[in-house]
Amino acid sequence: MWDRLVEYLVFIDGFTLGLNILALCLYVMFVRFNTAFVLIVASGVALDLFHQILKIYLKSLFHFTEYLHLINVAWYLSFAITDLIFIAAMLHVIKTKNLIRDRASDLMLVGYMALACLQVFRYTDRIAIGTDVLGPFYSTGVVMINVTVSCVLLLHALRSIYVTTGSKVAWLINR
Amino acid sequence: MKNKIAKGLVLVFGLGVSGVMLAQDVTAATPEDDTSTFCDLFPILCQVTTQGGNGGGEEPPKPD
């Protein structure tokens, strides 16, 4: 049962970037442009693309076995640091630009904070201490958080469209 | 007017990009096996089997 669920999550994780872009486009087209949601999702898509390029680059270095320790450090900590920079930058811009916040964008930031913590925990577990017990928790946790964030963003975009277009229809009827 | 142009651009590019990304064949073992439009347009991104950030749950080999 659990293995089947993980299989489904991994399958959906194959499309999370596409789902995030879809949620962003739908929201911009039908709802509003200058909100925290648009800023966070657009920046999150850029961060995910950066993570993909970073992952491809680091994977290309795996055959340098003498530098595997350094590659492991770069793998966990670069993801964690970029996540933390992303969160700090988003909170700063939202505050300075006084953008409207919502629960979905807050949840995305919480998700990235959880991912950063997960990377640091796994680095401590696997490299710093060497206990290596968090492997399954790490691989499932990253996928689960990615999929949850993407689903919440898409649902929030669809709900916002429903609310916005619904109120417009009601306004037209009551005219 | 500018707003409408921006929304039009989002419609054309955004939905197009998300469409081809959702059409990626994630079951393909190698980029050469994936014949979807996604891999024609984004060959670099097609080298990974997941689109999720933070490494998608993968890990490097453990150092000795």
Image (tube, coloured by chain):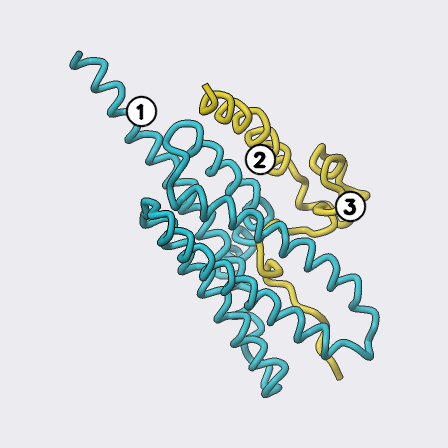
Chain colours: A cyan, B yellow
Disc on the earlier residue, 3 or 2: 2
Residue A131 horizontal side relative to residue A90, left or right: right
> What residue does disc 1 label?
A165
Q: Label 1 marks which chain's residue?
A: A
> What residue does disc 2 label?
B18
Q: Is disc 2 in the same subunit as disc 1?
A: no
Question: Is disc 1 surrounded by few (<14), some (14 to 19) or many (20+) residues within 10 Å?
Answer: some
Which disc, if any, is residue A146?
none
Question: Could you tell me the amino acid type at mark 2?
Answer: Ser
Question: For the point 63% across and 56% down, which residue is it?
Answer: A51
Q: Label 3 marks which chain's residue?
A: B
Question: Do the CB atoms of the residues marked 2 and 1 lie less than 8 Å apart?
Answer: no
Q: Where is residue A65 in the image (x, y as percent from the top left)?
A: 82, 76
Question: Could you tell me the amino acid type at mark 1?
Answer: Thr
Question: For the point 74% across and 39% down, which residue is it?
Answer: B39
Foreground residue, B61 or A87? A87
